[in-house]
Image (spheres, rainbow, N blue to C red):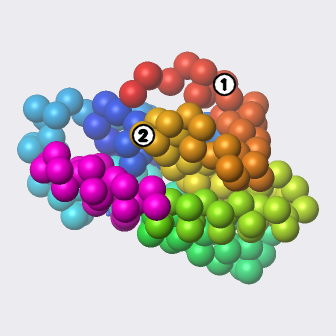
């Protein structure tokens, strides 16, 4: 199967997709477009946005859909339909957290941004991190769903990495199970090798 991933020359939404490919040891074309080329590419995408994944002559859009599809293709969706559904649940939940994060992160007004950031840190951030920490503490294994790595683990570990970048490297310290989970995902040999040589941003 020939896979071609198209995104900007940055981590952003595409990084979890690159990490899924890395984890599975699957080759793909990492098509990183310059922002000046975006208007020409935009018209050819299904929803006017990237990332997109071309699979042979077919095109798939929407980050989570692409991750879920690759999870099934590359055997990273858990052992049964229940575990596959838990992957969806946890990714939807971390996405809810990031919907709150974007409210402060992309706020242009400096005063509103300070207030929105304080709100984010006081309510959704601890709510979601403590719930994920609790979920992980009940799993027999290092990940969130079970003993085996899933695409949801990779998606969520990448988001936790983003939180460490924006909220500070110690943001996971009050959540030891979650912190250990994030580190376990990044210690998977194929992921570790990929992350050690990826572009800095
Ligand atoms: N729901 C989409 C959102 C994709 C999205 O917002 N992509 C941004 C880059 S992160 C984009 O294409 N921006 C350029 C534009 O909208 O013209 C997904 O999850 O993939």
State yes or no: residue 100 in magenta. Answer: yes
Where does label 1 land, which residue?
A: 193
Q: CA distance from mark 1 to mark 2?
A: 23 Å
State yes or no: residue 148 in magenta. Answer: no
What is the span of residues highlighted in magenta in the rendered image? 99-122
Where does label 2 land, which residue?
A: 166
Q: Residues within 10 Å of mark 1 (few under 14, many from 20)?
A: some
In the picture, measured across the screen, residue 180 lies left or right of residue 41, that is right
Report if residue 20 is visible in the image. Answer: no
* Residue 128 screen position, x and y as percent: 57, 65
Report if residue 36 is visible in the image. Answer: yes
- Circle 2 SS class: helix
User: Which residue extends farthest right?
Assistant: 140
Identify which residue is drawn at 80% across, 69% down.
Answer: 79
Question: Looking at the image, which is closer to me, 147 or 135?
Answer: 135
Quarter of the displayed picture in which ligand 1 can be seen: bottom left
In the picture, measured across the screen, residue 180 lies left or right of residue 170, that is right
Q: Nearer the viewer, mark 1 or mark 2?
A: 2
> Residue 93 has which mark?
none
In the picture, measured across the screen, residue 142 lies left or right of residue 162, that is right
Identify which residue is drawn at 56% across, 34% down.
Answer: 169
- Circle 1 SS class: helix
* Residue 82 screen position, x and y as percent: 74, 80
Q: Residues within 10 Å of mark 2 (few under 14, many from 20)?
A: few
């Amino acid at each position: 199967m020939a896979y071609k991933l198209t995104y900007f020359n940055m981590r952003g939404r595409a990084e979890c997709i690159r990490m899924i490919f890395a984890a599975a040891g699957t080759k793909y074309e990492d098509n990183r477009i310059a922002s000046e080329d975006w208007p020409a590419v935009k018209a050819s995408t299904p929803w006017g946005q990237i990332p997109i994944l071309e699979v042979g002559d077919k095109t798939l859009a929407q980050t989570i859909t692409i991750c879920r599809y690759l999870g099934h293709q590359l055997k990273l969706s858990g052992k049964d339909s229940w575990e596959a559904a838990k992957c969806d649940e946890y990714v939807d939940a971390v996405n809810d957290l990031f919907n709150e994060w974007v409210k402060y992160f992309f706020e242009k007004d400096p005063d509103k941004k300070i207030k929105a950031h304080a709100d984010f840190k006081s309510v959704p951030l601890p709510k979601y991190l403590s719930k994920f920490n609790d979920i992980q503490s009940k799993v027999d294994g290092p990940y969130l769903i079970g003993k085996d790595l899933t695409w949801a683990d990779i998606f969520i570990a990448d988001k936790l990495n983003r939180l460490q970048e924006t909220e500070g490297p110690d943001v996971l310290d009050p959540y030891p199970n979650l912190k250990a989970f994030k580190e376990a995902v990044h210690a998977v040999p194929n992921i570790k090798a990929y992350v050690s040589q990826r572009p800095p941003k």
